[in-house]
Image (cartoon, rainbow, N blue to C red):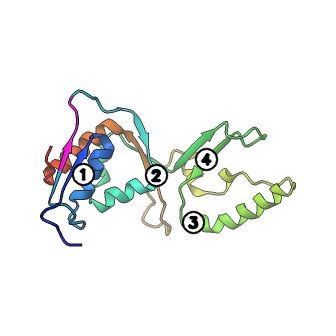
Amino acid sequence: MSSNPNKNIVIVGGGTAGWMAANILMHPVKHLPSTVDLIESPNVNPVGVGEGSTPALKQFFDLLNIREADWMPACNATYKTGIAFKNWSINKGFHRYFHPFPTAVDSHTLPSFIYNAQLRAAGIDVQAHPNDYFLATKLAEQHSSPLPSDNFPFAVDYAYHFDSNLLGLYLKKIAIKQGVKY
């Protein structure tokens, strides 16, 4: 797509979402706008809460060549390998469920999980708790990093937990350096 010199984009609202949009629009591969302006109220504070994400956020940072070693310390970020749901079922043994982000190694345990889940649905009492079948669950339980050692042959998808206010401020600095008008 070629650059249109008459195309100007205005983003109304900052915070994490506004500054993410500004950074994507300024990414050199996109070549969409000739200018990007971001307007945010100085009277409205961003919602400064802890945020969780999915592996798509890692893809965002990778696309923009933003290194984890740079942004994570600045935003009090930690790795996360899935999403925990407490009290998600009244069935004994299933009060907690950890929804894992996928890993390549899970392709080896997924067929067993599906088979046992089908047996359990048919009334057969077999082990079918998803927490017992996926690597990400084990990593979370052991408080282990999702970054594999060099000799581990499988990729591990992961996401982050971070302070959204700090991330918005971090992305703001990058966007302004890239030419976003504030």
Give the Cα separation between the discs numbered 3 and 1.
36 Å
Q: Position of residue 143 (x, y in %)?
A: 51, 44
The crowd level at tag 2 (other Cα within 10 Å; few <14, some 14-19, many 20+) is some
Q: For the residues carrying marks 4 and 1, which lies nearer the camera in this image?
A: 1
Image vertical order of residue 113 relative to residue 14, above or below: below
Tell me, yes or no, whether the two marked residues, 4 and 2, touch with CB atoms within 8 Å: no
Q: For the residues carrying marks 4 and 2, which lies nearer the camera in this image?
A: 2
Q: Is residue 39 magenta?
A: yes
Tell me, yes or no, whether the two marked residues, 3 and 1, touch with CB atoms within 8 Å: no
- Where is mark 2, residue-wise? 54
Secondary structure at numbered mark 3: loop
User: Residue at the location (35% across, 39% down)?
Assistant: 164
Secondary structure at numbered mark 4: strand
- Where is mark 1, residue-wise? 22
State which tag comes first along the sequence, 4 or 3. Answer: 4
Q: Which residues are magenta?
A: 37-42
Q: Position of residue 43 (x, y in %)?
A: 23, 27
